[in-house]
Amino acid sequence: MAFKGLKPISYAGREVWPLIEGGKGVAATNHASSGAWAAAGGIGTVSAVNADSFDPEGKIIPQVYEALTRRERHEQLIRYGIDGAVAQVQRAHDIAGGKGAININVLWEMGGSQAILEGVLEQTRGLIAGVTCGAGMPYKLSEIAARFDVNYLPIISSARAFRALWKRAYHKVPELLGGVVYEDPWLAGGHNGLSNAEDPLKPEDPFPRVKALRDVMRKEGIPDAVPIIMAGGVWFLREWDDWIDNPELGQMAFQFGTRPLLTQESPIPQGWKDRLREIEPEDVLLHRFSPTGFYSSAVRTPFLRSLQARSERQIPYSKAEAGEHTVQLDVGVKGKNFWVSPKDRDRAREWTVQGHDNGLKTPDETLIFVNAEERDMIRKDQTDCMGCLSHCGFSSWKDHDDYTTGRLADPRSFCIQKTLQDIAHGGPVDRNLMFAGHGAYRFKLDPFYSNKFTPTVKELVDRILTGE
């Protein structure tokens, strides 16, 4: 008996539990985890973001970029993306064995997202039930879904965002709206949809925000049977007791992003899984270092702390004497056209003594100070860019028109594809970006995981269904 009489819902012509596996990004959700989630009766989600493909022996093919130009490397990225996601979907479908459903997840702001999505859907007809898509405003999602006859499920963080998507495009394809994912921008892991009007330090209660979303959906004639999928901060269903069968909200479903990371089928390396058991509440940081420009939530590893420190070693400058900028900078830069305040010159001298003796310009007329090793890594990563984002703050890449954002590459950021590929395939946890939701500290507190117990996906789904 499921918690509070939780009942299956009708989705893509089949009955499934209203439990969705969060898609997550690069290789953190794959065929094994999503196929198992579907086999347990829920909706599994294959990540179609730089997904792994396989050689004839079943070994993962390393994504190596040998082309000389960024545009050619970008074409390689698209081919890797299509081949990998197709392979993952086919394997997930086999594992599911006709149970549950398989979705794919794409990020609208990933480089070549439309080409990858269309390429995957073309080669997986009949295998995919729906497409979840966030990280931007995916207006074309409904149009693409209609061409391939799959459900589409936008990921949004406000009623206003959904209204804009519906008015501009989605109202033309109402019959394929499979659900609306409300992703809590303060609690979800990975990239979040905080707007400039919202305070990152003041989380808001999700209930009125989800109620506002349902109000918009009702006003537009969308039936209550189309579920709102709560994502971000979901751990125990018993904590959402008031949301289930609540006439104010209509049909609800729940997405689990962080909990499925610690399962036997989860593809993340053992070091990452071990680290999840140690996380404290203050260890997950909502930050703005991502080259996407979005806020995102990740564990405060030494990698993330180094980005924090890099931005703290930052001073504004002018190209001529002006205002408080009355002295010329004499460390970290070549030339004399860097005017700063006397206080900031002293700070820069101090950083130089500590070994951070290279000043790098940012797009905001500031300088950050790094050591020679950091400088060389930043420059190499920028040179090696393969265009994994539609707009990249770190490398100034843009995947269309003239292929440049027109802004100076920002050394306060990092190559996100490089670090996510590395951590997902066994690279050192401490030297990479580790995404996690803000509820990750609960692994340490939840008795289900005591004595280093790692459940199968089926055991986790069964546990979730009890309310725990």
Image (spheres, helix red, strand yellow):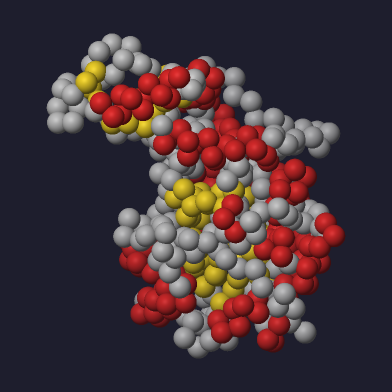
Residue 434 is drawn in which quadrant? top right
Q: Residue at x 62, y 77 (%)?
A: 239
Residue drawn at (79%, 53%), measured in percent from left and top?
265
Name above or below for residue 300 compared with residue 205: above
Please give the name of the residue rendered at 60% of the width and 42% of the height, measured from the top-left corner: 301
Residue 186 in the image: x percent, y percent? 48, 61
Residue 347 appears at what percent x and percent y?
A: 36, 28
Count of all numbered marks drawn on residues in the image: 0
Residue furthest to the top in view is: 335
Image quarter hosting the N terminus: bottom right
Viewer-nearest residue: 286 or 386: 286
Between residue 364 and residue 1, name the one nearer to us: 364
Residue 458 sits in quarter: bottom right
Task: Locate the C terminus and report the quarter of the image it occupies.
Answer: bottom right
329 versus 119 height, above or below: above
Of 373 and 24, nearer the camera is 373
Does residue 448 sit above or below 417 in this rendering?
A: below
Q: Is residue 461 left or right of residue 392?
A: right
Q: Give x and y (percent) for residue 107.
A: 51, 49
171 and 388: which is toward the camera: 388
Query: Residue at image x 67%, y 82%?
Result: 6
Image vertical order of residue 252 relative to residue 78, above or below: below
Residue 240's quadrant in the figure?
bottom right
- Relative horizontal placement of residue 468, taking residue 134 as reference (left or right): right
For the question of whether residue 450 can be seen, the reply is yes
Q: Is residue 86 visible?
A: no
| Image x and y of residue 113, in percent | 49, 44
Left/right placement of residue 349 relative to residue 90 reads: left
